[in-house]
Image (cartoon, rainbow, N blue to C red):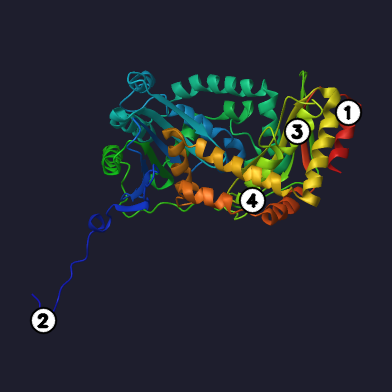
Amino acid sequence: MTSRGSKVTARPSSEARAVARTQTLIKGTGGIGTVRKTTLPGGLRVVTETLPSVRSATFGIWAHVGSRDETPSLNGATHYLEHLLFKRTGRRSALDISAAIDAVGGEMNAFTAKEYTCYYARVLDTDLPLAIDVVCDMLTGSLIVEEDVDVERGAILEEIAMTEDDPGDCVHDLFAHTMFGDNALGRPVLGTVDTVNALTADRIRRFYRKHYDPTHLVVACAGNVDHDKVVRQVRAAFEKAGALKNPDAQPIAPRDGSRTIRTFGKVELLGRKTEQAHVVLGMPGLARTDDRRWAMGVLNTALGGGMSSRLFQEVREKRGLAYSVYSYTSGFADCGLFGVYAGCRPSQVHDVLRICRDELDKVATDGLTDDEIARAIGQLRGSTVLGLEDTGALMNRIGKSELCWGEQMSVDDMLAKIAAVTPDEVRAVARDILGRRPSLSVIGPLKDKQAARLHDVVA
């Protein structure tokens, strides 16, 4: 009993306090989809982009875990786990999982990167509930059993062998090691034969339980979808699996990185009996949150992003020294890479590298012309839009944005950022990035005298 005039306020329970929070992040206009986000009790985020004009939908779940989160002895565990989530759950066998999506003409896949992993299915909009049920079941109810680990080990070892048989692919792994050394960013996503052979079901199971908590996950769905329906279906699937146990749990923040190890002037040569020499010449780039990334994107496009780029014109069009030559950037939470790739005859490797190094030095010193910058801005704006013309690309954009940046940017805002890049900004980032001493990775049948001269390129 209380005295007259006093007021008693009941303390809400955890269940009452933990309610789903929904926000509209981007209002769709002029063919641009509406992006909405709901954070469920338990810390699970659900982001959708609604486009009523299409008849497909892509549903994905992004996990805040990549090869960067592995210890040396666990190298390859994230990718191994990606394979195992397709093997069996408490409700479905591996055949049941694949047959369910095949039966409706859909497609399902996954990929592992340095800082995240994604599982997704693309289906007709009417079959979206099935895709949600299957993918959520995989992420919450997978059974990591010894039998499946042993079977899948063989498949992963074959995948490693396939990569090693492709020197044009393998050289990028070598370049990461050249730049970052023997730390998580420098090790291959697939792992090595030794580390994969050493992984056990128990170790992978512990890795799964640690990194696939709902607070580490982002659900992303794009296409002809209803946000509220997607949220209800995802919530039902996770609650059925008992995955939303802690209603007060909050999503983890975007990754901010830890330490960055950068090397300068290092050369690594992997001798292989290949028809071509495959080279990557590069230097430290920008973190993905760096405000200069828009100028870096323009610089990269002008240097090696198309047939009119500096490198393509100088190496292929004018001299015919390589069929494939391009530049690229990779941005991580706290650092990045800029690289130039070329594949050429071993006898011409030094000519190709000399031209590439000369062009990088010229741009670092003199900058690009206004015409080159204007053309690169137009190319980058066009490729940005054309690359988002299907629901899979849209799902990738909103899922990665939420996981890596914790926010969404509309296509119009992205185009505006690119258009706002000035020649001075491009020249400034060129001086900073391209003015650094490069490192070099080479795979090919180089003779001793050729190998000895490689250090001259980075001197």
* Inter-mark Cα distance, 3 to 2: 85 Å
**Looking at the figure, which quarter contains the C terminus?**
top right
Taking the spot 41% from the left edge, 38% from the top edge, the residue there is 61
Question: In the displayed structure, does residue 93 sit left or right of residue 319?
Answer: left
SS class of the residue under badge 4? Answer: helix
Q: Is residue 433 rendered to the left or right of residue 95?
A: right
**Which residue lies under the disc numbered 2?**
5
- Judging depth in this view, the residue of 189 and 321 nearest the camera is 321
Q: Distance between the residues labelled 4 and 2?
A: 65 Å
What amino acid is labelled 2 in the image? Gly
Q: Nearer the viewer, mark 4 or mark 1?
A: 4
Sequence-first disc among 3 and 2? 2
Q: Quadrant of the N terminus?
A: bottom left
Marks 2 and 1, Cα distance to the nearest angstrom? 93 Å
Q: Earlier in the sequence, mark 4 or mark 1?
A: 4
Q: Can residue 387 be seen in this view?
A: no
Q: Which amino acid does label 3 sit on?
A: Gln
Give the CA distance from mark 3 to mark 4. Answer: 21 Å
Which numbered disc flags the more N-terminal residue, 4 or 2?
Answer: 2
Q: Which of marks 3 and 2 is in front?
A: 3
Of circles 2 and 1, which is in front?
1
Q: Which amino acid does label 4 sit on?
A: Ala
Within-10-Å neighbours for mark 4: few <14, some 14–19, many 20+: many
The image shows residue 58 at horizontal and vertical percentages of 39, 33
Which residue is the site of mark 4? Answer: 295
